[in-house]
Image (cartoon, helix red, strand yellow):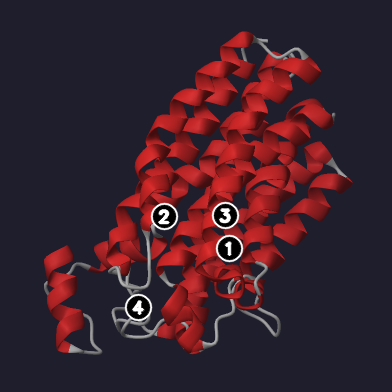
Amino acid sequence: MASVVGRYVAAGRRSRPKEMPRYKVWLMASRPRTLPAAAAPVLLGTGLALGDGGMRIWPALAALMGALLIQIGTNLANDYYDHVRGGDSEDRVGPVRATQAGLLPPKTVRNAAFFVLGLALLIGFYLVDIGGMPILIIGIASLLCAVAYTGGPFPLAYHGLGDVFVFVFFGLVAVGGTYWVQTLAFGPEVLLAGAGMGALATAILVVNNLRDLETDARAGKRTLAVRLGMLGTKVEFGFLVVLAFSVPAIGNGAFGWSPWTWITLLAAALLFRPLSSVLAYSPRKDPRTLIPALGRTAQAAGLYGLLLGATLALG
């Protein structure tokens, strides 16, 4: 598939190539590699609930499905809005965007985004029935921000607020909301776990924005990386990694977490090479050199949520 897309983009065509099945185009547009980052905070929140004796399987599964649908809907919305706003230009480095490449009509992608977010809304009704007003507020905010990330009159990603959005919704909100629908409780240790998860989820975005720094600046997309510059973005990445892997130590000291939570540090091994790539990156280097770092950071975030959730489940 990659070779087909490469030939297609190089030719500059605007119709979908016949040799690429439509289901593969939609699969590419949904960006399945981003889904572990959406699932990880739900696994973490569920593990914390299990450790506290409050896990409920159906709310946990509904939270997982809702998180995945919101992630896919956000991806499709980004694909559409980045195209119509000019954020995805032909010199952009990274995975092919279906709308920008002409693989799918823009309105079709936009409608698909709203359809997927509508499915997430249906699941949200069930979670609101369980979790009440806090989940209603979280659900409405999540859906609105999924569209407002790159769409609407004030797109968050275009004003340097994308990192804040990811930290809050893929960390604090996702972990806290998952814990709440199972236990109807909340506490500072939930906030701490959510901060760790949010830090690594944001680190994925930081690598992405560092890679696209120059093209985003030319397109007028004022991401936080564009605002901070290359050095500031590297510092942000390092800070987020340190924050994430400080969480087990803080949790052990402040909340008496199980010593098993130190196993979470195994996920740090996946970040050695990304950290090296980010620190060594310069304007003279090909942005494509950061693509492996992006994938490994996403893997580290997924493993982090899985390990921390599993060890917190031990009590």
Q: CA distance from mark 4 to mark 1?
A: 22 Å
Secondary structure, mark 3, is helix
Is 78 placed left or right of 282 in the picture?
right
Residue type for callout 3? Val
Q: Could you tell me residue 117's position as x and y percent?
A: 59, 62
In the rendered view, would you say 201 is above or below 164?
A: above
Q: In the image, which is nearer the foreground, mark 4 or mark 3?
A: 3
Residue, x 48% and y 79% (percent of image)?
A: 216
Q: CA distance from mark 2 to mark 1?
A: 11 Å
Q: In the image, which is nearer the foreground, mark 4 or mark 2?
A: 2
In the rendered view, would you say 141 is above or below 64?
A: below
In the rendered view, would you say 314 is above or below 207?
A: above
Secondary structure, mark 2, is helix
The reply to whether residue 65 is visible in this rendering is: no
Badge 1, how many Cα within 10 Å: few under 14, some, many 20+? some
Write down the residue under mark 2.
278
Secondary structure, mark 1, is helix
Q: Are marks 1 and 3 in contact (CB under 8 Å)?
A: yes
Residue type for callout 1? Gly
Write down the residue under mark 3.
235
Q: CA distance from mark 4 to mark 3?
A: 24 Å
Q: Which badge, 4 or 1, comes first in the chain's sequence? A: 4
Residue type for callout 2? Val
Secondary structure, mark 4, is loop
Write down the residue under mark 4.
92
Q: Quadrant location of the C terminus?
A: top right
Residue, x 32% and y 58% (percent of image)?
A: 291
Q: Could you tell me residue 135's position as x and y percent?
A: 79, 46
- Could you say which quadrant of the image residue 187 lies in? top right
